Amino acid sequence: MSYRSESKKIIAQNRSAYHDYFIDEKVECGMELKGTEVKSLRAGKVNLKQSYAVIEAGECFICGMHISPYEHGNIFNGDPLRKRKLLLHKREITKLYNEVKQQGTTLVPLEIYFVKGRAKLLIGVGKGKKLYDKREQAAERDTKREIDRHLKNN
């Protein structure tokens, strides 16, 4: 299960996911969207911050993803926080389900982008970080920054 590295137009990224989770595996999937939702995505009116993916009855859904209503839309604008179905193969869903059954792992949306005109969502299997993990990562980043600064000056 890998995601494509073709030319893609990134719409939104969930940077806090890399801060809050150790991301083990990434999977690209499609989304079942309404027409006005696609237009809002093209305008960049989406927020992934509080979103998560769940597997229910053999299907994968994304919850909490906020797609703002299309401003030139009409009565067909849907609920901005509705549960949206993710388009994955059955074997991919079962593999993800087996990984999520483990304690402390969850499906985290990482980014939304367009590939060949189709909206795609990159989800990752994440294991939650503890506070000391976040501190350790920040310390490593600071030391790397200092080393790079010293090497640049010398």
Image: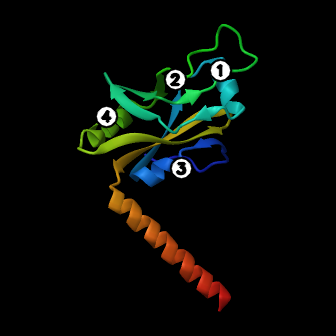
132 on left or right of 111: left
Label 4 and label 1: CA atoms lie apart by 33 Å
- Indicate the amino acid at tag 4: Thr
Q: Earlier in the sequence, mark 3 or mark 4?
A: 3
Q: Which residue is mark 4?
A: 94
- Indicate the amino acid at tag 1: Pro
Circles 1 and 2 in contact, beta carbons < 8 Å: no
Q: Residue at x 47, y 34 (%)?
A: 51
Q: Which residue is mark 1?
A: 69
Q: How many marks?
A: 4
Label 4 and label 2: CA atoms lie apart by 26 Å
Q: Nearer the viewer, residue 49 or 118?
A: 49
Query: Element under label 2?
Result: loop
Circles 2 and 3 in contact, beta carbons < 8 Å: no
Query: Element under label 4?
Result: helix
Instruction: For the C terminus, give its image quadrant.
Output: bottom right
- Indicate the amino acid at tag 3: Arg
Assess disc 1: are there few (<14), some (14-19) or many (≥20) residues with their C-alpha within 10 Å of its C-alpha: many
Label 2 and label 3: CA atoms lie apart by 20 Å
Q: Earlier in the sequence, mark 4 or mark 2?
A: 2
Q: Nearer the viewer, residue 135 or 83?
A: 135
Residue 81 shows which numbered tag? Answer: 2
Tell me residue 92's x, y (percent): 38, 37
Q: Which residue is mark 3?
A: 15
Circles 3 and 4 in contact, beta carbons < 8 Å: no
Tell me residue 128's x, y (percent): 34, 49
- Residue at the far top in the pictured view: 75
Assess disc 4: are there few (<14), some (14-19) or many (≥20) residues with their C-alpha within 10 Å of its C-alpha: some
Q: Residue at x 69, y 21 (%)?
A: 70
